[in-house]
Amino acid sequence: MMRTWHSARRLLPLIAVFGTVLAGCGREDLSVLRPQGPAAESSLGLMKLAISIMIVVLLIVFSIAAYVLIRFRRKPGQNEIPEQIEGSFKLEVLWTVIPLILVIVLAVPTVRTVFALGDNHSGDKNAIKVKVTGHQYWWEFEYPDYGIKTAQDLIIPAGKNIAFELTTNDVLHSFWVPSLSGKIDTNPTGATNRFSFSAPKEGVYRGKCAELCGPSHGFMEFKVKAVSNDEFKQWIEAQKAPAVLPEDPALAQTFKEQCLKCHAVGDQGLSVGPNLTGIGSRESVAGILLNDDTRQDGAPVEENLKSWLHDTQGVKPGNLMPDPKQDMGLTDDEIDRIADYLAGYKLN
Amino acid sequence: MDWITTVDHKKIAILYLWAGGLFFGIGGIEALLIRWQLIKPMNDFLDAQTFNELITMHGTTMIFLGVMPVIFALMNAVIPLQIGARDVAFPFLNALGFWTFLFGGLLLNLSWVMGGAPDAGWTSYTPLSTSAYSGTHGVDFYTIGLQIAGLGTLIGGINFLATIITMRAPGMSYMRMPMFAWATFITSAIILFAFPAITVGLVLLTFDRILGANFFEPGAGGSPVLWQHIFWIFGHPEVYILILPAFGIISEVIPTFARKRLFGYSSMVFATILIAFLGFMVWAHHMFTTGLGPVANALFAVSTMLIAVPTGIKIFNWLFTMWGGSVRFTTPNLFASGFIPTFTMGGVTGVMLASAPADFQFHDTYFVVAHFHYVIVGGLVMGLFAGLHYWWPKMFGRMLSETLGKWTFWTFITGFHLTFFVQHFLGLMGMQRRVFTYLPNQHFDTLNLVSTIGAGLMGVGTLIFLANIVITSRNPMDADDDPWEDGRTLEWSIPSPPPEYNFKQTPLVRGLDALWKEKTAGNKGMTPAEPVGSIHMPSATPLPFIMSVGIFIAGFGFMFSRDNFSSGFVSFLFNNYIVTGLGLLITFGAMLMRSLYDDHGWHIEPEELEGR
């Protein structure tokens, strides 16, 4: 009696947690359990099959275990020696064959899906080609067909297949947009990876780096923004347009001298660091300071840019950007004005 | 002094236990710090660098310095007794194995106070672990510390292989060997084949870091994926090095407390061999997202799933051992019966992970964290708790308190499931592993809080276990030869703790579960296979300790051979490999002494044996 009560008490928290989880299942733009594209759906399909098989297995094991533990408990005064059974050929064959069948049931669709997901669309004329490069701790997205580069926000046309080619500039990273597709590592050149996914629905999806890459590994986030075909074309044109520099000539000079040594805007500057073209219209600053005028999930973009520029190491420890004040000698006022300018640099 | 010079397997077992317990404690504190940092989003309790050092050291410490030595402790304490031997085949090497493990572990943990612990994850994937991206000496402590500790493991493995092959008592054929002896045998074979891989990997990485080689440096033609292959060709079998001994323990505990022989003994043996065999062929399932291509992924997916079959055989055999038995719930058996469902849960998620396309989502998330903790903590650590409670009276001559033992079990298992069950869902909801913090509003907050509370409870369970040891250590050493009353194997036929020669007369084994067979035949103990005679014993010696100190100094000197110290003299010593040379001189000097000075050991004479 005592024992059953104990087991029940042990299960209570699990049941409670199960309840909350099933009610939630996570965010639509993030959770593996709420797929928003075909690649993530096929992974989830396999997961559902595997989970069903496993739950059946667990139920069998748990019920036999529970039965055995209750039924064959030694009672007080019980002192006889049970029969010493050697084994049972039939039973042992049974629990060899059944798992084997279960494995085959899971293995067949697994192999099929492996090959289906192996299709990388690199030869597909209709696919949008994107070269992804991982950096400590930001993502670079290059569209070789259009000759443009951007960072942190990957803009894609909804419904189209995206053919990715992935590498890294430094250590290994792993490119992961849970609601759209499984992850793939970014290896250095020579071991370039290719894969593909599509997002049928317009929207913003959260992406993450899944391979330990240094202190700010957890902050190496990005967004995938699926937009309509027309919007995508407009965005491409706006990206290609000449750079918009600060109106104040003195500030423009400082910006050119200090920031464009590493960053690029439009046709100017170098692309060592993240490309800043149209940074004012991005979803986040530095991947983690979410731009949100309603202040529910983050702060307005100019505020985020200021937090970033005033304390780059505090926001993203270990990143390679020199500190604007300490290392580049910018004044607080200059930093704030550059932040304001960047916040106003929007595409469209 | 006695402890430094001992070559007795029972004392070495206790040394392994205390040292392993110490590192286990350090690893546990690291775990609690990690969980405390993750209790809420954007927590600033730890900074990112410290967090990465903690996860690296937690993984490395737990695997190499926490659980493996405790496994070795049990093997050392039990195996010679179970097979009716007076010691292991090479007692001197046994001591050497322990000391190299201890000094390797000490070297690794010195990194905390000597300028930066390793921070590239316990897998140390390159190029993050190369000197370009990991500038402190952290990863050097990892490569050299693990190299030295690994020597000990390899020595231990070879020693057990030799012991089990050559020193079984008369009548003990392989198919009459207790399951724990079988598990030790197979585990040692895995060690023999898997550890050379990590040895090579660590040497290459050391060369890259200290001598400027380019095995893993992509810019100079090296391959980071090569490191992953080398690491996992060792790393996957390592999982079986850890879990097979637990299987062995469970296979001893359950029959004893069910009063029934192990169901399907021969299928258990072959399942163990099969698991070990398959374990070597599935390493790339840790690398599905590396981009090996669909053919490799498909092959490794299917071969991984196959491991479920022999594992399933074992689970059902254990359940059917209890079926029809007379099951007594002592603490060891509580842990053993808790092990079965818990380990099964870790096993089924393993099959899920084997499905490569699904693994594209699971990989490097908290789902994986949950899975391997279910296997390693829910499987191995529960197995070790079962084994420790079970063999404690044999090792120390004292029973642990059953009341405290039951408290340990219930707090530990409740805390365990609370900690790790929810992590499956965290992973599926998009939380990647090894993140030092996470943004709010991602539905991660509550589950992380639950997980941290669970970790605290596991900590409490472990403390109760420690309290149990401390409290019962004041009791008199009065445990019976066969304190659980239903002991089935040879170790229960001799006093607790055993005399230093174990068996006055080597026993004659007449079947599986040798002691049980004699008991049911109405005999009081084992029938001896030899007359009482003079027993040859190896001499105690400080040489293994001295050799290990030498290796420790050499490793230390090599690691700092490129550094500039504030004192020119110290720089001179290190930069010219003088410290390294000195260390090697000590080691080789001790080896030379061992070779030149013939130590014939000593004898315990029959009169002395009878006098006791």
Image: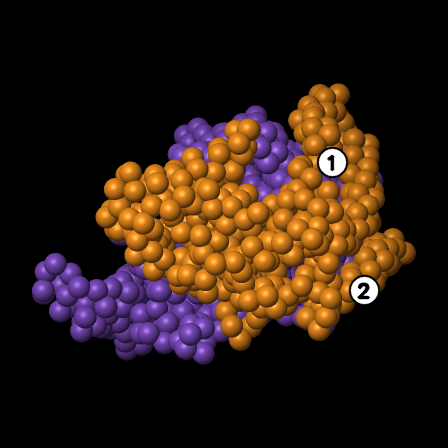
| Chain where mark 2 sits | A
Instruction: Point out the frontmost of discs 2 and 1.
Output: 2
In front of the other: B277 or B74:
B277
| Left or right side of A129 for B258 | right
Looking at the rendered structure, the number of numbered marks drawn on it comes to 2
Q: Colour of chain B?
A: purple
| Left or right side of B570 for B522 | right
Element carrying mark 2: helix
Q: Amino acid at mark 1?
A: Val
Count residues near mark 1 (Cα–Cα under 10 Å), then give few for <14, some for 14-19, many for 20+: many
In front of the other: A2 or B425:
B425
Residue B481 is tagged as: none
Q: Which residue is mark 2?
A: A112
* Residue A347 position within the rendered picture, expressed as x and y whole percent measured from the top left: 54, 49
Q: Amino acid at mark 2?
A: Arg
Residue under the point 71% across and 65% down: A127
Residue under the point 32% across and 42% down: A335
Q: Which residue is mark 1?
A: B327
Q: Could you say which chain is coloured orange in the image?
A: A
In front of the other: B8 or A56:
A56
In front of the other: B213 or A41:
A41
Query: In the rendered view, how is the structure colored?
Result: by chain
Residue under the point 65% across and 57% down: A233
B596 vs A100: above or below: below
- Taking the view exactly as shown, the residue that stands out farthest to the right is A90
* Residue A136 position within the rendered picture, expressed as x and y whole percent measured from the top left: 44, 56
Q: Can residue B518 be seen at all in this image of the molecule? A: no
Residue under the point 23% across and 68% down: B562
**Location of the N terminus of chain A (image quadrant):** top right
* Residue B204 position within the rendered picture, expressed as x and y whole percent measured from the top left: 41, 73
